[in-house]
Amino acid sequence: MEEHVKKSLEEWKNEINDLLIAIEKEYNEIKQELQIYSYKFSITKQVIQSTVNDELIRDIRERYQTPFEQKFNQLKEDIKDLEEKKKVFQMFVDKIDKVKGKDENRSYSPAN
């Protein structure tokens, strides 16, 4: 493989690695927020189950449970999307390494 091709692939790989780092950072932030909303949603659910007053139950559902559940579900979707992004961009890195590795093996082969 020619040197300018190797250099270009390495620059591209570095760019993708920067994206992966940003994705990983966002993933960790959302994962923490998801953990918080998991607790909030669970606690709210338990309180509702222990409450007999229908008016209070409606108020709690409206004020807490529904928004917490919506946020929790949205965060779960965000996590799935980020996991898919990580997987896809990691494939780029793997493919670049594979292409460069094959060429390096060919270059140093005893048959050449």
Image (cartoon, helix red, strand yellow):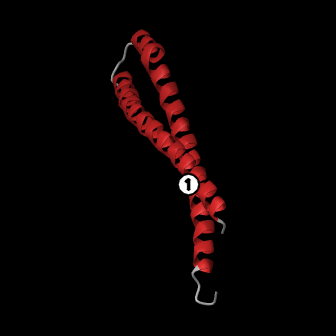
Question: Mark 1 packing: few (<14 Cα in 10 Å), some, or many (20+)?
Answer: some
- Dot 1 falls on a residue whose secondary structure is helix
**For residue 95, side relative to residue 41 (left or right):** right
* Vertical comparison of 1 with 71: above or below: below
Which residue is labeled 1 in the image? Answer: 90
Judge by depth and name the residue closer to the eye, 11 or 31. Answer: 11
Amino acid type shown at disc 1: Gln
Which residue is painted at 47% across and 44% down in the image? 21
Residue lying at the far bottom of the rendered structure: 111
Residue 60 position, x and y percent, is: 41, 15
Q: Residue at left 52%, top 49%?
A: 17
Q: Is residue 84 left or right of residue 59?
A: right
Q: Residue furthest front?
A: 3
Q: Position of residue 82 (x, y in %)?
A: 54, 42
Q: Position of residue 50 (x, y in %)?
A: 33, 23
Q: Going 44% across and 13% down the picture, which residue do you hit?
A: 63
Q: Where residue 86 sits in the image (x, y, percent)?
A: 54, 48
Name the image quarter holding the C terminus: bottom right
Residue closest to the eye, 76 or 25: 25
| Vertical arrangement, residue 43 with respect to residue 20, above or below | above
